[in-house]
Amino acid sequence: MNIGIEALSFYVPRYYLDLAALAAARGVDVDKYCIGLGQEKMAVPPPDEDVITMAANAGTQVLTHVDRNSIDTIMFATESGVDQSKAGAIFVHSLLDLPSTCRAFEIKQACCSSTAALDMAVALVHRHPDKKILIVAADVARYGFCTPGEPTQGAGAVAMVVSSSPRLVQLDNESGSYTEDVMDFWRPNYMDEAVVDGKLSIRTYLHALGESWQGYHRQSGRGLDEFERFCYHLPFTRMGEKAHAHLLAIGAATEGGAVSREPICRVSDSLHYNRQIGNSYTASLYISLSSMLEHADDLSGQRIGLFSYGSGCMASFFSGIVGNRYQEWLTGDLHRDMLGDRVELSYEAYEELYAQSGPITGDCQTPVHDTGQFRLAGITGHKRLYERVGASAAVPEPEPVA
Ligand code: CAA
């Protein structure tokens, strides 16, 4: 049975900071960000935009041509969840008007839980080929102010429908995984910003890539020359280029002269969107896939390799074949317009939004900013209230503190 990605779309907040403005404020040569990290802009979410609103917007886009009643399960992959108990998937289930028979849960392992969700979705469709699974993956990548991680911030969400009609990418059965207990990047419950050992995280990413690839290669017997393109988890786009060079070096050592093609052209199409968005953790690899499908010349029937890395760490290398008529189902215009229509923030406005990262009390109204179709209206009695933009959720004024 053919199973894979039937539909794919992403959403980003309406605001961004040009990294030239950040470089000027930090007294850093802008080329360090634009060339050294390969980033131009970073998405900045306002306080009324969170992983739920971003995921619901991406979900709305992806369900345009899919019958909501056919969705059997919604899985929410995130490492910036809004509640320790209630799954973000339930809020999104409600905002998307999914049927009450549809299961909803959240799944976590840093940036690669979206790939774990994809694996689980494939298994579920295998059991019930008539069902479709909706995966939403959303994150706000937030690092300490003035830290080396700051220029690699960003935010965004993807939504994917997985089914037995894999119009975009039919997934192969083989995948290689790697797990190791490493403290390269984490976010304790009492902190809003990630803690990161940047250099260790890069070394661990590359090591995990090598190990995952070897596992995949042993299972499938495929060599690197059997792939037309590669997509990587992109904490910053230069990481994708580093990763690909590393994979080719491993391939050259194990496959000898068999690895021939020029490296960068096999990843460059996957970098366009992430360069404009920044890191989006769980969404990053699939925004990279979107960029690849929407920028590369015809990939019909070609095999692509994908690498998913989640700090801490767990990683997977897997692959798929692009559908024969995939271009008919792409939404590149929507994505390009969304990125092009964003509002540029001044450095001062970024600093102000950074300081108001999100609600910190159980009763508050959230100031209205420019968002997509959904916004966080506020919190009352510790309950988060979401509203469709234009339809007020009438959040009660917070009680004055006695
Ligand atoms: N012109 C051009 N290039 C320049 C330059 C200039 N003027 N100045 C510096 N550079 C280059 C450097 O040579 C370097 O390139 P190479 O790595 O190819 O040598 C690059 O710019 C970055 O410079 P530094 O290494 O000096 O940068 P840094 O120490 O300030 O921070 C970072 C870089 C470690 C990635 C930091 O941004 C960070 O900690 N980011 C968050 C963690 C992260 O993204 N880790 C990635 C792997 S973990 C993961 O993937 C999971 C996840 O999503 C977090």
Image (spheres, rainbow, N blue to C red):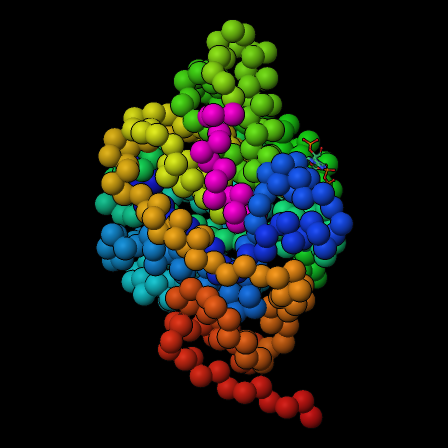
Q: Is residue 134 visible?
A: no
Position of residue 297 relative to residue 143, above or below, is above
Position of residue 240 relative to residue 196, above or below, is above
Q: Residue at x 34, y 48 (%)?
A: 333
Q: Residue at x 46, y 63 (%)?
A: 53
Query: Residue 354, percent across and down?
Result: 65, 63
Q: Bounds of the magenta span?
A: 264-280
Query: Residue 313, percent across and down?
Result: 63, 38
Quadrant in the picture for the C terminus? bottom right
Query: Residue 303, percent across and down?
Result: 37, 25
Question: What is the magenta segment's predominant secondary structure?
Answer: helix
Q: Residue at x 39, y 50 (%)?
A: 335
Taking depth in this image into account, of 385 and 70 the one nearest to the observer is 385
Q: Is residue 30 visible?
A: yes
Q: Is residue 272 magenta?
A: yes
Query: Residue 104, percent across and down?
Result: 40, 58
| Quarter holding residue 46 | bottom right
